[in-house]
Image (spheres, coloured by chain):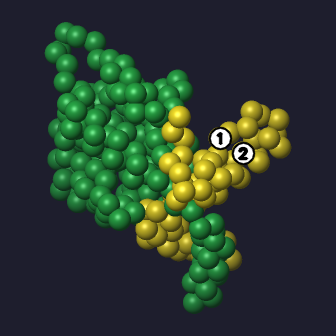
Amino acid sequence: MVRRVLEFKEARRRQLAQLPPEEKLRIIVEMQKWARVAHIATGRPPTPVWNLEVLMRRADEPPNQV
Amino acid sequence: MRHERGAEATASALFAFGYTLDVNAAIRAFRELQAQGLIRAFALGGASALVFYTEPVLTYDLDFFVIIDASPESLVSLQPIYQYFERKGYQVSGEQVQIGDAPVQVLVAYNPLVEEAVRNAIELPFNGETAPVLSPEYLLAIALQTNRHKDRERARLLWQQASLDENRLNDILTRHGLMEQWNQLRSQM
């Protein structure tokens, strides 16, 4: 049973490794969100998350420029 | 088969945001720096470069390694680079520059291995353009040299998931005196 779980996990990781880099960056943003939640829940300073709102309005105006 | 269907469902849930990370803006800014003569060469490295070779790894910024012309006796300063970014209207905060959607960390190639890695970076397709990225063999060698826990984990990931040229890897590791660390890590896998 444990071996099957490990094999499943390994297969998923290999699948993730095959995704295009653009998709992997999106997954990293999701990981940042979860990391932030975990930090807040355990009383540690919140960690940053790449700004989704800015990402969303990118087509209309260049983000982060003064 | 059930596993694959599950993976597809997770993937579509994860990718339903409809946004694009503008890493290309950062790459264009560095190409401009190069054209201006402020840097000699640059390449994406660190955890952000792993997206080209392995499963995604949590990171908070994009690491750009740069080679700057400086005489051996002079101190390397990143000031001209930060000043250039500020003139272009990018937000500089501490060591980070916010370019497009990406917080960018500028790191000077700090030893012969990293400098060689930047010089031998490969242009890979990214979001409709190309980006200079450290090759997986050099990323593994740098991870071994840095040798923190997370670096050893990255070296392991690269070995298990990236398409490595083993002859090239052995050559790099031998020339930079990293074979012992590599054999030690391999014995633990």
Q: Give the camera-side residue of A20 and B79.
A: B79
Image point (44%, 57%), residue name: B51
Q: Which mark is residue A48?
A: 1
Choose top left, top right, bottom left or bottom right for residue B5.
bottom right
Count of marks, rendered view: 2
Q: Give the camera-side residue of A19 and B139.
A: A19
Residue A26 vertical position relative to residue B97 in the rendered view, above or below: below
Q: Is residue B69 visible?
A: yes
Indicate the secondary structure of the residue bearing disc 1.
loop
Image point (54%, 41%), residue name: A64
Q: Give the camera-side residue of B166 and B130.
A: B130
Q: Amino acid at mark 1?
A: Pro
Q: Which mark is residue A36?
A: 2
**Residue B14: where, in percent of width, then height?**
63, 69
Q: Which mark is residue B27?
A: none
**Residue B131: where, in percent of width, then height?**
31, 53
Image point (72%, 45%), residue name: A36
Residue B1 vertical position relative to residue B8 in the rendered view, above or below: below
Give the crowd class for mark 2: few <14, some 14-19, many >=20 residues within 10 Å.
some
**Residue B12: where, in percent of width, then height?**
62, 76
| Contact, mark 2 vs mark 1 (Cβ under 8 Å) | yes
